[in-house]
Every structure is written in structure tokens, then in C-alpha cells.
Amino acid sequence: MSNVEQLERELTLRKLQLNNLLTLTQAINENVPAAELYKMYCDFLRWHIGIAKVALFFKEDGRWKCVQWEGIPDSDVLQYDMNDVLPRFVTNTRVNGDEHPFVRHFDLVLPVMHKREPIAYAFWSEAPGEDAYSKLQIAIAITNVLAVAIENKRLFRNQLQQELFNREVQYAAEIQRALVPVRLPSSRHYQLSSIYKPHFAVGGDYYDVFELKDGSLVFCIADVTGKGIPAALLMSNIQATLKALVTRCQSLEEIVIEMNDAIFRVTGGDRFITLFLCRYEPHRRSLHYINAGHTPPLLVCENEVIPLTNGCTILGGLPQLPSLDIGGLCLLRSATLFAYTDGLTDVRNNRGEFFSEERLVFFLKENGALDARTLNEKLLKHIEDFRQQQPLPDDITVLTCKLSL
């Protein structure tokens, strides 16, 4: 073959290689699925570069996976976990004679790095012919182009997922804000004040207050399992159910039994809530309550602090409540009912000490004579001083009700 014919042949080959390289690049720009890009890449190396054996690795769900291979048996790919093998290749490496049964199929390995971290690995056999070096450079170039394109796809997909998650959190927060009472009722018989501090944008705590036509006051505090959209939707369902039951049912027992049934039907026992539900009748000075697995609220009367524990198990965990015990008190003097979620007593300081129920009881004994709003404001400052800038471990919700005779 003359020199002219040789040059014409090489020129035609380069033209064909560049055309196919352009086709692959266009496919990347047109957002062709990754699986098709892998196949196009291997076909290009085999048929236009002459590389007989190819294996391409990318990370999926945090682990390296061989996403495309040509020229080697499927069994030799599928039976080996390469996650402990690949990190030893940090630069372009000849692997002739490597002892690993997968690696020894090949002559070269190319790790593609981004910010000193590998984003892909390509294994090849040698390119044939006198121009093997130039073929190798083309193969390296196209491998880098493909790897960066796939990494960009991954980053873009992660960005979309993050944006979707942020929107879900925003929607859940909006649902939750709509459920929390904007104003709490007040009369000469009672005064209410609340604290609501979600740990994240969306919490699992809930409270509500209802004034009845006969002058009674019904209020509750609850802790819903889970966070985000599912918890917010369950909370919305609980609020709607409770509002309907409070006006329809004659007793707290009936309300709680129907609440349990409604939650179990919605969640099938996979999610549940703890609930404290109370009814105060000023004209009788009577207080009735059911504690459904909730952190016991505290009734502060002068220097005495009484935990309100009577009730039943959590709601929604079982199709029927195994037992139910209604608590009742007749107030002989003014008192403060302090209901809260366990995020309050789980607060820690720099020494790792919990705020604890003991510290809370001590605080309430000292400050129980204050009106509801002042007590809550002083408690918030006390908690901030105690935790010494340590992060909050969970949602903190407090419903304080000052009951006056």
C-alpha cells in the first residue's frame, strides 16, 4: 500500500471516528437515557477504535456497578464485587498479569476523576495497530466526556429530588401551620397559652382547643409518629376527625374510641399517635381527661404537682383499645394544667444532662402562680439558658391552661 493510500485510509478512519464521536456527543446533549449512552460508548470503542474488551463502572446507590461490558462472559462480571478492588486504581494503569480474576481480562484501566474523587472506571483491552497510541487518546477523551455527562445527569437528578423534597416540606409546613390554632380562647374561667417549636420545618406535634356551647372547654395535645408530608396529612385527618367528634359525642370515652378506630383504618397500625384529651366544666369545677399513651401533663395547684396518667394505650396501634380509664378531678382552688410533648424534657445541655421531668416540676412549683402566657415566656427563656446553644433534639410543644374558680 502506497503512502498516499495509507494516508487516505487513516484520514477516512479518523473521519469515521470523529463522526461517531459527534453522534455520541449529540446523544448526550439530547438527554438520551444512560443505558443507551453506555451501549453507544462500548460499540464505538469496539467497532471504531478496535478495543475488543470493555467494562464500564459507575456508582449506583453509593456502590460501584458494571453498567456495560463487551467481550467477556457475563458470569465473570456478575460474580465479582469490585467495590474493594476499584479504589486501588488512582491513575491510568496497565493491569496485564493482575491476579484478580476480573481484572486480568483487560490490559488497561482508566479511572475518571472529578475533584480528586473517581466518578467512573473503564477497563479495556489493548487497541490494535501501529496507531494504538492515538486510538487510546481518543478512547480516553470519549470516556471522560461520557463520565462527566453521566455525573452531570446524576447531579441534576439529585437537584430535582432535593427541590421536590423541599416543596414537600413546604407543603407539609403549610398544612401544619393551618392546623395550629392562631388564637386561643380566653374567659374569666380559663386562660391558655402555647409554645410550638418544630425540630425541623415540619414536626409531628399537634394541639387544639374547642369551646362548647354549654361553656365547657375541651383541649388536647398529641404527638404523631413520623415527619413530613405523611405526618402532616395524618395530623390533618386527626384534626378533622376530632372536630367532628367533639361536637357529636357525649363523652371523652366515645371520642377516644372513635379516634382510635379512625386512625387505625387510615394507617392500618403502621402509624399511631399519643394523645391527651381533657374537658373542663367551669360551672362544676370538674376536670375529666384521658391520657392515650402521652407524656403525662402536670396539674399544678399551689405547691402540689399532680401527673395526669389515667387513660389507655396509644391510638391507632390496635383495632380496639384493650382498656380505657377516665381520670377525673374536682378543683377546690385555681390551678394550672401544663401539657407538653417529650421534646421538652429531652433537651440537653453541654454536659449532656436532660432538662428532665424533675427539673420541669421544680420550675412549675416555683412559677405555677404566674398567668399562662408569662409562665410560658419564662419557661422558654429557662430552656434556652439550660441548653447552652445545644440543638433541640425534637419538637417542643406546650399547652398551658390556667383554670380559675
Image (cartoon, helix red, strand yellow):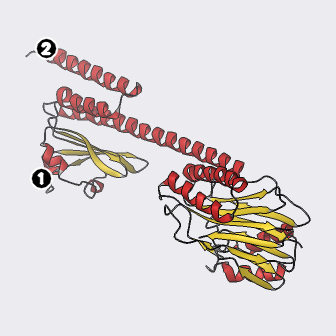
Q: Which residue is drawn at 68% across and 51% down?
A: 244
Residue furthest toward the left?
Answer: 1
In the image, residue 335 above or below residue 107: below
Q: Residue 298 carries which label?
A: none
Q: Mark 1 belongs to which amino acid?
A: Gly
Does the rendering let one see residue 160?
A: yes
In the image, residue 398 above or below residue 3: below
Mark 2 or mark 1, which has the lower sequence index?
Answer: 2
Q: Is residue 368 left or right of residue 387?
A: right
What residue is shown with label 1?
A: 97
For the residues labelled 2 and 1, the Cα–Cα distance comes to 38 Å
Q: What element carries label 1?
A: loop
Residue 153: image x %, image y %?
42, 37
Residue furthest toward the front?
Answer: 250
Q: Mark 2 belongs to which amino acid?
A: Glu
Residue 108: image x %, image y %?
20, 45
- Location of residue 48 (image quadrant): top left
Quarter in which the C terminus is drawn: bottom right
Residue 55: image x %, image y %?
22, 42
Q: Which residue is drawn at 83% across and 76% down?
A: 335
In the image, residue 193 above or below residue 162: below
Residue furthest toward the bottom?
Answer: 303
Does the rendering let one see residue 395?
A: no
Residue 132: image x %, image y %?
18, 33
**Count of picture labels:** 2
Q: In this view, does 100 lie to the left or right of 202?
A: left
Residue furthest toward the right?
Answer: 188
Q: Which residue is drawn at 14% across and 48% down?
A: 76
Nearer mark to the viewer, of 2 and 1: 1
Q: Is residue 41 left or right of residue 350?
A: left
Q: Which residue is drawn at 67% across and 46% down?
A: 174
What residue is shown with label 2?
A: 5
